[in-house]
Amino acid sequence: MFKRHDVILIGVILLIGAGFLFWRHISNDTAGEVIAEITSEHGVYILSLDDAGIFYLESLPNVVFKILNNEIAFVESDCPDQICVHSGFVGRTGQAVACLPNRVLLLIIASDSDAVDM
């Protein structure tokens, strides 16, 4: 069914994939402080994920965020579908959650400009 070269090719592809996942895990752990950037039509807000608590934008009091264990999540929103709330907590560099009806984007970034941003 499979020839010898097919098995070698599949093995190489699997090794490359495993190496990429390992590199991504290592680079994210050494990225420095991770922060949340919340963008709305009213401005950009920066939050440190080290500060646990509840946060909301004064311009959008019906959109509430919660920071816990260096992760952040939408916990309340007045949007009809609640996709942002059901997305749960995010805390890894490069993760994003959006609330389209309220035009709010939550993006996790590294505060260190030399860090890998994925």
Image: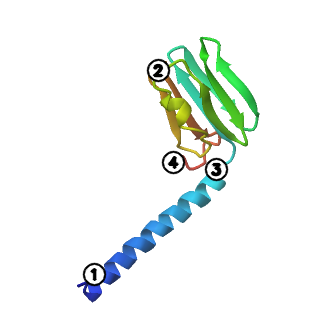
Mark number for residue 31?
A: 3
- Marks 4 and 1, the one that precedes in the sequence: 1
Q: Earlier in the sequence, mark 1 or mark 3?
A: 1
- Which of the two labelled residues, at mark 2 and mark 3, occupies the earlier sequence position? 3
Relative depth, front residue between 47 and 100: 100
| Residue that carries the numbered disc 4 in the rendered image | 118
Task: Name the spot of residue 60 as percent of width and height, x first.
Answer: 58, 14
In terms of secondary structure, where does tag 2 sit? loop
Front position in the image: 67 or 107: 67
Write down the residue under mark 1.
6
Q: Disc 4 on helix, strand or loop?
A: loop
Instruction: Please provide percent x and percent y for residue 22.
Output: 55, 65
Name the residue beneath numbered marker 2. Answer: 80
Name the front one of labels 1 and 2. Answer: 2
**Amino acid under label 2?**
Pro
- Of residues 77 and 11, the one drawn nearer to the viewer in this rendering: 77
Q: Residues within 10 Å of mark 1 (few under 14, many from 20)?
A: few
Write down the quadrant of residue 108 in the picture. Answer: top right
- Amino acid found under the numbered disc labelled 1: Asp
Q: Earlier in the sequence, mark 1 or mark 2?
A: 1
